[in-house]
Structures are given as structure tokens and as C-alpha cells.
Amino acid sequence: MWAVGVIAYELAFGKLPFDNEYVSETIECICEKEPNYDKVGVSPFLIQFIKECLNKDPCQRIKCYEALKSPFLLSY
């Protein structure tokens, strides 16, 4: 689900959620920072879906069966 969140973020915001020149910097950002969700015109349902996919705790991250029931996917 992490990969789904990264792809959804890139499609919605036009950039990767954690984009740095070096892999070590990217890993550090993944561990310590949150992506920027400020963009006009992005559905709040999509932002919530991405946040649930990019939850740093794998036990708390949205599961596939839960994602299929998310308000974002159900709105289409």
C-alpha cells in the first residue's frame, strides 16, 4: 500500500512525496518528515487516502481491503 500511496501522491501533486538527490536523504525524509499536502484543487478524500497509504507504521497503514472501501474510491 505504501507504493500505491507514492503513486497516488505523484499523480495528485506532480512530484514524489519524498524526493531528494541522494537515496540516504530520501530515506531520512521518509523516516522523519511528512509530505506536503498543500495544493489547491486536490480532493480531501484523496489526501486522506494518500495519508492512510503513507502511514509510517505498517501495522497502522491502510490494508488493501480497507482501501477498496475508502471514500475516495467509492466517490467514483
Image (spheres, rainbow, N blue to C red):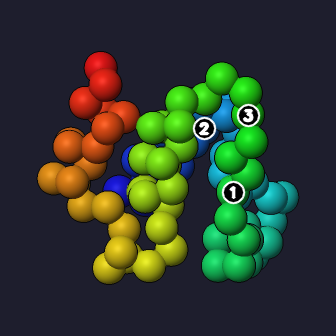
Residue 11 as seen in the image, left or right of residue 68: right
Q: Between marks 1 and 2, how big is the CA–CA gap?
A: 11 Å
How far across and down, in percent of the image, does residue 10 sit?
60, 38
State the residue position of label 2. Answer: 10
Q: What residue is at 32 percent from the left and 38 percent from the top? A: 71
The mark closer to the camera, 2 or 3, is 3
State the residue position of label 1. Answer: 35
Tag 2 secondary structure:
helix
Precedes in sequence: disc 1 or disc 2: 2
How far across and down, in percent of the image, does residue 66 sit?
21, 54
How far across and down, in percent of the image, does residue 20 sit?
80, 58
Q: Are marks 3 and 1 in contact (CB under 8 Å)?
A: no
State the residue position of label 3. Answer: 39
Q: What residue is at 21 percent from the left and 42 percent from the top? A: 68
Q: Are marks 1 and 2 in contact (CB under 8 Å)?
A: no
Badge 2 density bin: few <14, some 14–19, many ≥20, Cα 10 Å = few
Residue 23 visible to an observer of this rendering: no
From what the image shows, is residue 28 above or below residue 73?
below
Q: Between marks 3 and 1, how big is the CA–CA gap?
A: 12 Å
- Quarter placement of the C terminus: top left
Q: Are marks 2 and 3 in contact (CB under 8 Å)?
A: no
Residue 9 as seen in the image, left or right of residue 28: left
Among the 4 quarters of the image, the one containing residue 60? bottom left
Q: Amino acid at mark 3?
A: Lys
* Numbered circles on residues, count: 3
Q: Amino acid at mark 1?
A: Pro
Q: Amino acid at mark 2?
A: Glu
From what the image shows, is residue 50 above or below residue 62?
above
How far across and down, in percent of the image, does residue 41 sit?
66, 23
Question: Outermost residue toward the left?
Answer: 65
